[in-house]
């Protein structure tokens, strides 16, 4: 009798035993501004880490150098490689033909974040000015759904991000630049952050990424949003400043903060086994051999080259993606929505879902992405 029942299940559903239901109920997107794929996949750059013009703190050599690129990348980004590298996926190692690029032709921040969050390229966006994005974003789309209204939030070091995600027009809470946490129910930690931020000034940018992280972390604990965008900036600041040592240290500290965030998520009933974490960047940088690593833009080769990292209950644990393939920044928006079971659309055609980030059953099941 049982065998007949099992056979019936296989005929009807393809596999009654192994059918996969979508598990993601929460999505957190994290960006490291201007962080190159080279450091993600090969660690500290041999042509830069011994260059005293760019490295003033010689301790980074002991901290991040090894003759093996696999060891180097694990030293630099232990959470990326010890956790995402075994339980999630990493895209963008061009040494094995796995490529991720900006589709926009400008290769700097506002056009990149806009492409990422809208799902398409607007060639009219060609500056980093504080002007509201004329295009709605996937965050707005999600925020308009009854289940997610009031459950989307944005935290950023760079103070232009609220304009890119249309925080004012959409009503999505956003904290950026030198803003303090606001409200009548602030935690003791948030009040302490408000006191410390004007004192501990970042002389290279608007505030330290640690303030952005802990403001976001405290908000997450207090408000329990379903969707959060956290944008860090120090890697780009130190890249432009020509401080490769600080660039590496900032990336390492960010990796540690992301690990702290992920471990906390796995300790909470609302988030454990129900949260997808997607990490990426807004653009690449130039090649070290041409001393262009400090800069980016349409005249700097390599600036369109970027990467993705993802981990969550609906993503196969494939680690480093070594298949030849081409992916684009504009695919992020639709992919974010798909993790929540939504079919995101906009006024222009948007980039397709990165299908390999999903277990196959979810893509073939119309109930998963409706």
Image: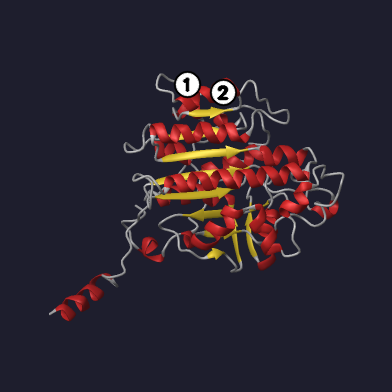
Question: Where is residue 181 drawn, in percent x and y?
Answer: 50, 24
Left or right position of 140 against 198: left
Question: Is 339 rendered above or below residue 175?
Answer: below
The image's colouring method is: secondary structure
Q: Residues within 10 Å of mark 1 (few under 14, many from 20)?
A: few
Task: Give the residue at x 48% y 63%.
Answer: 317
> Where the N terminus falls, by quadrant?
bottom left
Report the number of discs.
2
**Is 15 positioned to the left or the right of 48 in the image?**
left
Give the SS element for disc 1: loop
Image coords of residue 20 (percent x, y): 33, 63
Work out whether residue 219 or residue 117 is closer to the camera in this orientation and state it: 219
Q: Position of residue 336 (x, y in %)?
A: 46, 48
Q: Residue at x 62, y 27 (%)?
A: 130
> Is the residue under label 1 in contact with that under label 2 (CB below 8 Å)?
yes
In-front residue for pair 238/116 = 238
Helix, strand or loop for disc 2: loop
Give the labeled residue for mark 2: 179
On the rendered structure, is 225 left or right of 72? left
Q: Residue at x 65, y 21 (%)?
A: 199
Which residue was labeled with disc 1? 182
Label 2 and label 1: CA atoms lie apart by 9 Å
Nearer-the-camera pick, 279 or 343:
279
Q: Quadrant of residue 231?
A: top right
């Amino acid at each position: 009798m049982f065998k007949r029942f099992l056979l019936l299940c296989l005929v009807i559903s393809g596999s009654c035993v192994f059918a996969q239901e979508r598990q993601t109920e929460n999505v957190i997107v994290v960006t490291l501004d201007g962080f190159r794929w080279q450091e993600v996949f090969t660690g500290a750059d041999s042509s830069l880490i011994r260059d005293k013009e760019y490295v003033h703190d010689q301790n980074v050599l002991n901290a991040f150098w090894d003759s093996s690129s696999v060891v180097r990348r694990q030293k630099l980004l232990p959470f990326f490689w010890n956790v995402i590298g075994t339980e999630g996926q990493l895209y963008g190692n061009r040494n094995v033909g796995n490529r991720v690029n900006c589709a926009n032709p400008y290769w700097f921040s506002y056009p990149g974040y806009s492409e990422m969050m809208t799902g398409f390229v607007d060639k009219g966006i060609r500056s980093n000015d504080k002007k509201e994005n004329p295009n709605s974003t996937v965050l707005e789309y999600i925020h308009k759904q009854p289940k997610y209204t009031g459950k989307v939030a944005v935290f950023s070091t760079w103070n232009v991000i609220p304009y890119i995600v249309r925080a004012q027009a959409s009503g999505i809470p956003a904290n950026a630049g030198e803003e303090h946490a606001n409200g009548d129910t602030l935690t003791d930690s948030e009040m302490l952050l408000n006191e410390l931020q004007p004192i501990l000034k970042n002389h290279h940018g608007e505030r330290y990424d640690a303030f952005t992280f802990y403001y976001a972390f405290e908000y997450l604990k207090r408000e329990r949003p379903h969707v959060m965008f956290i944008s860090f900036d120090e890697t780009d600041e130190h890249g432009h400043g020509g401080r490769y040592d600080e660039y590496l240290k900032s990336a390492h500290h960010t990796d540690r903060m992301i690990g702290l965030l992920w471990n906390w998520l796995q300790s909470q009933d609302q988030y454990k086994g129900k949260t997808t974490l997607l990490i990426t960047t807004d653009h690449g940088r130039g090649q070290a051999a041409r001393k262009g690593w400090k800069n980016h833009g349409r005249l700097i080769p390599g600036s369109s080259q970027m990467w993705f990292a993802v981990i969550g209950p609906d993503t196969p644990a494939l680690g480093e993606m070594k298949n030849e393939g081409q992916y684009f920044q504009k695919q992020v928006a639709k992919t974010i929505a798909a993790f929540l079971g939504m079919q995101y659309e906009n006024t222009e055609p948007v980039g397709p879902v990165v299908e390999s980030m999903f277990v196959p059953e979810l893509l073939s099941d119309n109930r998963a992405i409706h």
